[in-house]
Image (cartoon, helix red, strand yellow):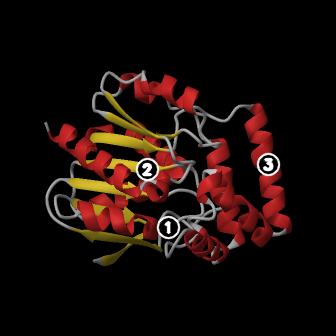
């Protein structure tokens, strides 16, 4: 069921389906809740699954010049409050993982578990911040050119041809975003704080889904972070880059299903 709630005078779009334990799925940069369609369809046979369009993405409105990860966490909280949900598991892909960590920092009592899907807890170092600043300059100059070249790099090289149709659709979806929203999210990613302490102090299980060929989240660094929580589960995808939700869809659905059962026990 597609739903809308208001927050700070603007509309948040989300989708909710199924019954039972609540699973919240948060998309990444230049994505939307549409990325979760098949995950939501399968997992809703066991759980109540909510997917949310983040600010400036999909059908959720643009708010600020900078969409911080803490603000995105507030968006997630508002949806949960609107649905009168007190406990949930949240899985975030890429930027969605950063928002999930911000939620874990601010609303930890609501979590039964959380997952970082091609994401990580370190803040950007100085070089990474400079790279994001250069990326913002490219977006300012030609948003479409940046998107066209950026999205294919998220896949393992051998998967680019295999998923050409889906990549084309993702490019079209990203091009529909306002330039100011594309920049606001990148600014928020650049400004995020380290969340390593969230992993170390977590009292709930943490899921890590990693790609061996992910050029955005290096496997070695992510595995080191996976050792920080007291209770962590790790899925390493051998044939995926940064888009394992599509590149190895069935494995990731099964992994999230198994994690939900761990969070229930």
Q: Secondary structure at mark 3?
A: helix
* Residue indicated by mark 3: 133
Between disc 2 and disc 3, the foreground one is 2
Q: Residue at x 33, y 71 (%)?
A: 15
Specify the quadrant of the image occupied by residue 75.
Answer: bottom left
Vertical arrangement, residue 92 with respect to residue 30, above or below: above
Q: Secondary structure at mark 1?
A: loop
* Residue indicated by mark 2: 92
Given residues 242 and 90, the one toward you in this image is 242
Residue 64, position in %: x, y? 62, 62
Q: Residue at x 28, y 27 (%)?
A: 203
Vertical arrangement, residue 189 with respect to residue 212, above or below: below
Q: Is residue 182 left or right of residue 99?
A: right
The residues tagged by marks 2 and 3 sit, at their Cα atoms, a distance apart of 24 Å
* Residue indicated by mark 1: 32
Residue 183, position in %: x, y? 70, 60
Crowding near the residue tagged with mark 3, few <14, some 14–19, many ≥20 C-alpha atoms within 10 Å: some
Specify the quadrant of the image occupied by residue 85.
Answer: bottom left
Q: Residue furthest right?
A: 141
Crowding near the residue tagged with mark 2, few <14, some 14–19, many ≥20 C-alpha atoms within 10 Å: many
The residues tagged by marks 2 and 1 sit, at their Cα atoms, a distance apart of 12 Å
Q: Residue at x 56, y 32 (%)?
A: 219
Q: Residue at x 14, y 58 (%)?
A: 20
Given residues 129 and 118, the one toward you in this image is 118
Q: Is residue 249 left or right of residue 80?
A: right
Residue 176, position in %: x, y? 63, 78
Location of the N terminus by quadrant is: bottom left
């Amino acid at each position: 069921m597609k739903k809308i709630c208001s927050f700070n005078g603007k509309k948040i779009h989300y989708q909710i389906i199924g019954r039972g334990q609540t699973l919240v799925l948060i998309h990444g940069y230049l994505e939307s809740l549409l990325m979760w369609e098949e995950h939501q369809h399968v997992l809703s046979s066991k759980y109540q699954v909510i997917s949310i369009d983040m600010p400036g993405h999909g059908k959720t409105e643009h708010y600020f010049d900078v969409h911080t990860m803490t603000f995105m966490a507030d968006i997630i909280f508002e949806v949960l409050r609107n649905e009168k949900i007190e406990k949930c598991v949240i899985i975030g892909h890429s930027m969605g993982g950063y928002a999930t960590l911000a939620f874990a920092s601010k609303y930890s009592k609501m979590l039964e578990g959380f997952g970082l899907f091609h994401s990580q807890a370190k803040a950007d170092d100085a070089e990474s911040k400079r790279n994001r600043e250069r990326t913002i300059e490219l977006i300012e100059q030609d948003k479409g050119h940046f998107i066209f070249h950026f999205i294919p790099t998220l896949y393992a090289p051998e998967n680019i041809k295999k998923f050409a149709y889906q990549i084309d659709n993702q490019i079209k979806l990203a091009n529909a975003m306002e330039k100011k929203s594309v920049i606001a999210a990148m600014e928020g990613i650049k400004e995020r704080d380290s969340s390593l302490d969230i992993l170390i102090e977590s009292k709930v299980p943490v899921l890590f889904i990693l790609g061996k060929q992910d050029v955005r989240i290096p496997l070695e660094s992510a595995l080191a972070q996976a050792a920080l929580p007291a209770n962590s589960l790790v899925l390493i995808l051998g044939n995926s880059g940064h888009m394992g939700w599509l590149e190895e869809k069935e494995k990731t659905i099964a992994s999230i299903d198994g994690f939900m059962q761990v969070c229930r026990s």
